[in-house]
Amino acid sequence: MDLSDYPLELPEGDRPMVRFMNVTKRYGTLTVLDRLDLDVAEGEMVTVIGPSGSGKTTVLRMLMTLETINGGVIYVDGKPLTHMEKGGKLVPANERYLRKARSSIGMCFQHFNLFPHMTALQNCMEGPVQVLGMSKSEARARSEELLEMVGMIDKKDQHPSRLSGGQQQRVAIARALAMRPKVMLFDEVTSALDPEVIGEVTNVIRQLVAEHNLTMLMVTHQMGFARDISDRICFFYQGKIEEEGPPEQLFETPQKERTQQFLSAVKDAG
Amino acid sequence: MRFDWDWEFTFEILPRLLAATVNTLIAAGLGYAIAVVLGLVFALAQRTPVRSLTFTVREVVEFIRSTPLVLQIFFVFYVGPQFGVRLSPWTAGMIAIGLHYSAYLSEVYRGGIEAVPKGQWEACRALNMSTRDTYLRIVIPQALPPSIAGMGNYLVGIFKDTPMLSVIGVAELLHTANAIGSENYRFLEPYTLVGIIFLAISLPAAGFVRLFEARVRRKLGL
């Protein structure tokens, strides 16, 4: 498919919050995503599972524009994210376009990536003040509200080095939410945590799902958690969606052999 | 040959050498100020996506680091006039030594910037920060503390290299000691004093750099 075959904008009535259309990602000769099609509806919580190397983290990183795209187009809210219009057709987006396009997306990382030279509160205020141009007092109010929500308000003046992994991840969630994204990405946010603090992070995400109409895309190894809160599960295998469906269906009656193998391997390990 | 140290002569020449020390410190300070700023420019220029700029700056830095400082000083001072650039010894000296050390400092900065984890850059992108804010507010503050030790070494280095400016007639310590020596046919005392003065400044300076590094780390909460 040539770039001119992709619509400049998705038509009214067929505008999921996120659409991967024929997306390919290669690292050298290794194809990580192979002509992927994936829609995420507004307010939907989709969890991506699969063996390591199946490309599930790449899906999130592409959507955050941390990786370049080798084929296809990603649309967010109907508009192209990875490409922009030029002379009536799509061309790869430049940095200026990307800055505008990715403003509706927020992301939390496996290793938190908090800014170590700033306190928890300063971490949350940084984006609103520097990027959104918000006044400091307004940004502080918003940040404190979010730190309250994730249960970190009493640690707001601590630097990340003084916080546990679970606490750092909760601050990172507040920091991402402070930018008011429409789409939130959670990339293995509990994988680097000690088992006893995983709950404090998953509880925050549960609360988000219950109380907010955020569109969320998550990669996790916590199968029980994924099953509880997801609207849909996508099982990735070798850069493609091997099988997808509602959690009960996918976990209880998986249709594909690879899905069955993966789930029983995970169950044995757990 | 015998060792005869003349204390009277020593005290007679000390004020002149101390006055020259001020010049040495000014030369080191000015040269370092140029190097600190220009070094950062060199380091950042090597990180732009503009290939030709990156390549040119990289080669310039390599060239400066691979040729002797004293040659660079001669070059700026004596070759400049052939191209119509006529500079005073001080100006030529400051340009040469500042440029020389900016090449070294750019490598220190580069190391510091490369030591900032990739996740920090990705977090900046996820927060949609501009490249400018990413550098100024996130990357450089974190690149600074690990760079301080290297920057301190070169501060002492530039101070010890200022005697090279004597070859074009900048009246710093060594130049003054030479003058005293040839006026009086006595070199033992002036050269010894120059050595002691350098030692008396270099040693505490290295200690201060370590204290400063600890302070910056504390201040940034690292």
Image (cartoon, coloured by chain):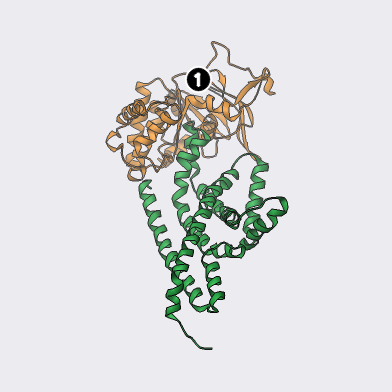
* Residue B123 point in image, percent of width and height: 47, 36
Instruction: Tell how many labels.
Output: 1
Q: What is the display colour for chain B?
A: green
Residue situated furthest top in the rendering: A13
Residue at figure coordinates x 41%, y 29% from the top left: A129
The reply to whether residue A1 is in sight is no
Check disc 1: other Cα within 10 Å, few if <14, some if 14-19, many if 20+: many
Residue B87 showing in the rendered view: yes
Q: Residue A162 location in percent, x, y?
A: 33, 45
Query: In orange, which chain?
Result: A
Inspect the image, locate mark 1, and give the three-letter code of the amino acid beneath it. Answer: Met
User: SS class of the residue under badge 1?
Assistant: loop
Q: Is residue A140 above or below residue B161?
A: above
- Name the image quarter holding residue A170: top left
Chain hosting mark 1: A
Vertical order, A156 against A177 (above or below): below
The quadrant of the image that shows the C terminus of chain A is top left
Camera-side residue of B195 and A29: B195
The one nearer the camera, A94 or A207, is: A94
Horizontal side of residue A86 vs B176, given as left or right: right
Q: According to the image, label 1 marks what residue? A: A17
For this orientation, the residue located farthest to the bottom is B1
Where does the N terminus of chain A fall, quadrant-wise? top right
x and y percent of residue A88 in the render?
A: 67, 17
